[in-house]
Amino acid sequence: MEYVKKLEEIRKDLKVRNDKWWNEERTDLDLKYYVPTDIICEGLLPFEVGIPKNIYDEVLGGDEHYNWWYNNSYSNYLEGNCIESFGGDNTYNHSGRPQNDINWETFKMADDKYIVVMEFHLGGDIRGNYTDEIVLEFEYDTQFLEVLNDISYEYGLCFDLEVDGKNYEITPFVLSECVEVYDTERQDNIYHIFGIDDEEVTEQIREQVEELYQNDKERIIKYMLNYKLIDEEQYKTLAEDKNKDGKINWNNLLMRTKDFMLNNENHTEWYKEELTYIIDSIIKRECV
C-alpha cells in the first residue's frame, strides 16, 4: 500500500524557518537550552508510517483540500476507526524545551499498534498555526513520549557550564521544564533547575548547591553526635566561634571524624567514599 509521508518535507521547511527565526529575530534566546526541531525530526523518522494514500486522496481530499486544522484530518478519521483514543497533548502544556512546540494524539489500532498523529507549531497563538499531520507508529501507548525525551541522550544534547570553578553537564528535554544538571565532581544530579540561559541556570545551581551543602554539613554533625565524637556544648562553641582558632578546631574535629569513619568496620566502602567526599568538601570550604 502506498503512503503519504510528510516528515522529511516538514523538516526541511522548518529548518529554513528556524534558522531565520532563531538567528535573526530571537537572538535573545539560547538554543542550547532547547531541543532543536531538526534533531527531533531525525529521531522520529524511523517511526513514520504516513497516511494511506487512498484515504489521503478519497477521504481527506488529497493535496488540494487536505488541511487537518479545519477538521479535514487524519486524526478525525482515526477517531472513528480505532479501538481506543488516548486523546492528545501539547508540549506547551509541559513547559518543555522543543524548538517548536508539538501537538499530538494517540490511537490504538486493531493490530495492537499505536498511531501517533503530531504537528509542529509554527509560532504565534498556540491554538493555531501548525504544520501538516505527521503519522507515526509505536508498539505501546507511551513509547512516543519516551522517544521524545530519549532524543536528548541519543543525540548528545549536553553542554558544559562552569559555576564557581566546578563543571556541570546540562541537558534539555522536550517534555520537561527543568534541565538535567549533572555535577561531574559529585557524580550526581542537581534537581529542579528551571533556567533557560546561563545566567538563570548559574543562579539556581548556586542556590541548590548551597542547600545541598548545608544538608551535608548537618548530616556530618549528626554523625559526630551519634558516635559521641562531639557533644552539644562543643558543637555550640564551634558554631559560634568564627576566628582562626575556631577554624583550626573545626578542621581537627572533621579530620578525626574522617579517620573514625574510615576505620569503622561496620561501614560499607560506598558509605565511606560518600562521607569522605562530604567531609573533604567542608574542610575545603570552611577550614582552608
Image (cartoon, rainbow, N blue to C red):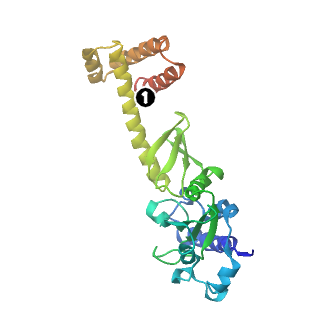
Mark 1 highlights which residue? Answer: 285
Residue most toward the bottom? 64
Q: Position of residue 86 (x, y in %)?
A: 50, 64
Q: Quadrant of the N terminus?
A: bottom right
Say which quadrant the C terminus sits in.
top left
Image coordinates of residue 152 in percent, x first then y, are: 60, 53
Q: Amino acid at mark 1?
A: Arg
Name the image quarter holding residue 147: bottom right
Dividing the picture into quarters, in which one does residue 23 lie? bottom right
Q: Is residue 157 above or below residue 241?
A: below
Left or right: residue 58 compared with residue 188 = right
Q: Position of residue 34 (x, y in %)?
A: 55, 59
Above or below, 18 against 251 in this view is below
Taking depth in this image into account, of 58 and 116 the one nearest to the observer is 58
Q: Residue at x 62, y 71 (%)?
A: 134
Instruction: Describe residue 261's horizontal placement relative to residue 170 as left or right.
Output: left
- The residue at the point 52 percent across, 33 percent down is 186
Tag count? 1
Question: From what the image shows, is residue 199 above or below residue 277?
Answer: below
Question: In the picture shown, does residue 264 fall above or below 84?
Answer: above
Mark 1, Cα crowd under 10 Å, few <14 / some 14-19 / many 20+, is few
- Of residues 144 and 110, the one nearer the viewer is 110
The structure residue drawn at horizontal position 25% and vertical position 20%, both measured from the top left corner, is 236
Q: Position of residue 164 (x, y in %)?
A: 48, 40
